[in-house]
Image: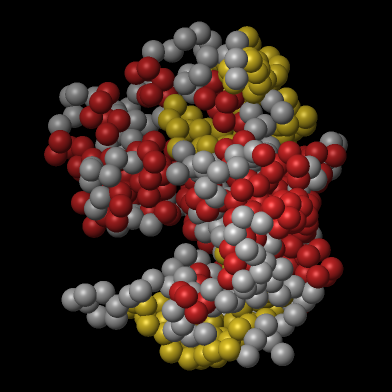
């Protein structure tokens, strides 16, 4: 018998004064005990809406048809109260973002104990104020933290969420999901915000749980590489419908649907070579034709170190974010800084960009050392951040956002000319002119990142620093942005400093790479050498963690 089955399920959202919007259209799939099934698709494909119908988390304005069965019960359309009997005890849910899902003002132990108490009270197994039960609950909290792969449960128990890493917080969510001893786990993008090494650890642990406990797992992801690595069966969704399903072997030996092929092509771990630049229509130099550097190296970092000191509880704590870091980036090439969170990548990028001062060492840009003025630096170097929405003012139109650096640094260029420049820059990043009058909130993540890139190019810089600029995007959108960066680099002779935790992305774009760990460079060479013949165990671990990297497509 299936733990969970969807039979011809359709889901609509009803909004006053509008036609019903269909999010899911006639989907059927099932999950058996001990089986891992993945649902793969881009944002908006309907995958999260579908799984939320199985745990009673659809909004009040939703309507559903078809059967959603948990064991022998058809739960389609049940109220939140009726779902309480199943949620937690029969089915556990692991959400995507632990930073949002965990209560920031409660210790971890309290949050797991609350989940345990709620389950026991629902089943009338826990009298209020019973001391013996409280001791048993505390002991169970330790057990579930350990079961979720946290090696020091007593220490984790007393900590607050902000004191834990992203991977540790995700394991806490797994512990909470396991606390009801469910037969089925539903995981909605549980690793998309994590470093690839931490992602591998979390997925390895979910595999272990299903093998040892016989738990069925329904895993939602946008990365077909993750699905091919892990799943017994893969279901691909697009625009609310299933377009293809099968085993990993069937997908590897030939997919039938063009959309599935596109997802395969977009997965970084499944690529075998670098991206080839495509011709692009050049926008005129927005800030005028200023003289370009003739230096062999655009960036030279020599023996740079940086220590941050914080005070907690009256005690000073020092963290060495950069420790004697050196590397060079040839003009017109891409150098990647790779490592896990806390490796020091972003600190080094900020030092290069003049946003953070180094304690020691030297940075030379375009052959020149010393402190650059803000205006001169802006003309030569621009930054593109991980989350475009955090750097795009929601009050401005896209045209104004793109040309904001020109408005600040070039008073001689009027508003009408700036608008024409904006249109040319939108052409350059392949966004239609109609978006010029849109606001940032009206854009998708990929469109917003194109706007951020266009803005970075508006002063005709020679160096662009990209700090995790594609890590928050669906893999298919990520592939489009990476190809765009390759096209723009060839067209404008740009030098990129590319910050990432994913070596699968590095091999598509980077000429050279430095692998960082705890602020130090552990390996640095051309990309082909590092990926083809890594010298350090840490580099081998990063390579092994890329989803799908060992598969032959």
- Foreground residue, 345 or 534? 345
Q: Is residue 535 left or right of residue 119?
A: right
Q: Residue at x 49, y 23 (%)?
A: 353
Task: Inspect this view and state whether residue 370 appears.
Answer: yes
Q: Is residue 245 above or below residue 330?
A: below
The picture places residue 486, in percent across and down from the top left corner, at 52, 46
Quarter where residue 140 is shown = bottom right
Viewport quadrant of the N terminus: bottom right
Task: Inspect this view and state whether residue 251 appears.
Answer: no
The picture places residue 48, in percent across and down from the top left corner, at 50, 69
Viewport quadrant of the C terminus: bottom right
- Foreground residue, 399 or 84? 84
Q: Residue at x 30, y 52 (%)?
A: 441
Q: Is residue 398 left or right of residue 390?
A: left
- Foreground residue, 100 or 402? 100
Q: Residue at x 75, y 80 (%)?
A: 33
Q: Is residue 132 above or below residue 219?
A: above
Q: Is residue 407 above or below residue 184?
A: above
């Amino acid at each position: 018998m299936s733990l969970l089955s969807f039979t011809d399920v359709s889901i609509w959202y009803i909004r006053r004064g509008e036609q019903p919007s269909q999010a899911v259209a006639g989907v059927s799939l099932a999950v058996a005990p001990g089986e891992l099934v993945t649902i793969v698709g881009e944002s908006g494909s309907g995958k999260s809406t579908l799984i939320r119908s199985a745990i009673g988390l659809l909004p009040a304005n939703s309507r559903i048809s078809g059967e959603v069965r948990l064991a022998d019960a058809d739960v389609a359309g049940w109220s939140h109260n009726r779902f309480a009997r199943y949620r937690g005890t029969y089915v556990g849910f692991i959400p995507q973002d632990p930073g949002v899902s965990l209560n920031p003002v409660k210790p971890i132990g309290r949050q797991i104990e609350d989940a345990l108490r709620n389950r026991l009270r629902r089943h009338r197994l826990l009298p209020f104020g019973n001391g013996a039960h409280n001791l048993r609950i505390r002991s169970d909290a330790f057990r579930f933290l350990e079961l979720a792969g946290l090696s020091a449960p007593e220490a984790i128990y007393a900590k607050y969420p902000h004191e834990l890493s992203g991977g540790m917080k995700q394991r806490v969510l797994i512990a909470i999901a396991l606390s009801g001893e469910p037969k089925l786990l539903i995981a909605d993008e549980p690793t998309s915000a994590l470093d690839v090494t931490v992602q591998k650890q979390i997925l390895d642990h979910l595999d272990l749980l299903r093998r040892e406990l016989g738990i069925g797992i329904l895993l939602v992801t946008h990365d077909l590489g993750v699905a091919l690595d892990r799943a017994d069966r893969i279901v691909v969704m697009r625009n609310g419908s299933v377009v293809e399903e099968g085993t990993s072997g069937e997908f590897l030996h030939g997919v039938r649907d063009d959309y599935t092929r596109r997802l395969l092509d977009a997965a970084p771990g499944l690529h075998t070579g670098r991206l080839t630049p495509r011709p692009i229509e050049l926008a005129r130099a927005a800030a005028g034709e200023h003289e370009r550097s003739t230096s062999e190296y655009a960036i030279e970092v020599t023996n740079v170190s940086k220590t941050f000191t914080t005070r907690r509880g009256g005690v000073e704590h020092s963290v060495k974010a950069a420790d004697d870091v050196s590397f060079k980036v040839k003009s017109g090439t891409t150098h990647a800084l790779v490592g896990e969170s806390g490796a020091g990548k972003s600190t080094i990028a900020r030092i290069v960009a003049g946003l953070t001062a180094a304690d020691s060492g030297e940075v030379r840009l375009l052959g020149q050392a010393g402190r650059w003025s803000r205006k001169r630096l802006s003309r030569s170097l621009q930054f593109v951040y991980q989350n475009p929405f955090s750097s795009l003012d929601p009050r401005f139109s896209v045209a104004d956002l793109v040309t904001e650096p020109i408005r600040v640094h070039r008073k001689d260029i009027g508003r009408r000319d700036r608008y024409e420049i904006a249109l040319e820059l939108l052409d350059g990043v392949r966004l239609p002119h109609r978006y010029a009058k849109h606001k940032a909130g009206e854009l998708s993540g990929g469109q917003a990142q194109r706007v951020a890139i266009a803005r970075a190019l508006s002063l005709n810089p020679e160096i662009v620093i990209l700090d995790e600029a594609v890590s928050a995007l669906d893999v298919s959108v990520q592939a489009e942005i990476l190809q765009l960066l390759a096209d723009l680099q060839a067209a404008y002779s740009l030098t990129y400093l590319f910050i990432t935790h994913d070596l699968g992305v590095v091999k598509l774009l980077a000429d050279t790479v430095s692998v960082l760990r705890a602020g130090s460079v552990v390996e640095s060479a051309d990309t082909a050498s590092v990926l083809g013949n890594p010298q350090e165990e840490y580099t081998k671990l990063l390579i092994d963690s890329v989803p799908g990297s060992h598969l032959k497509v």
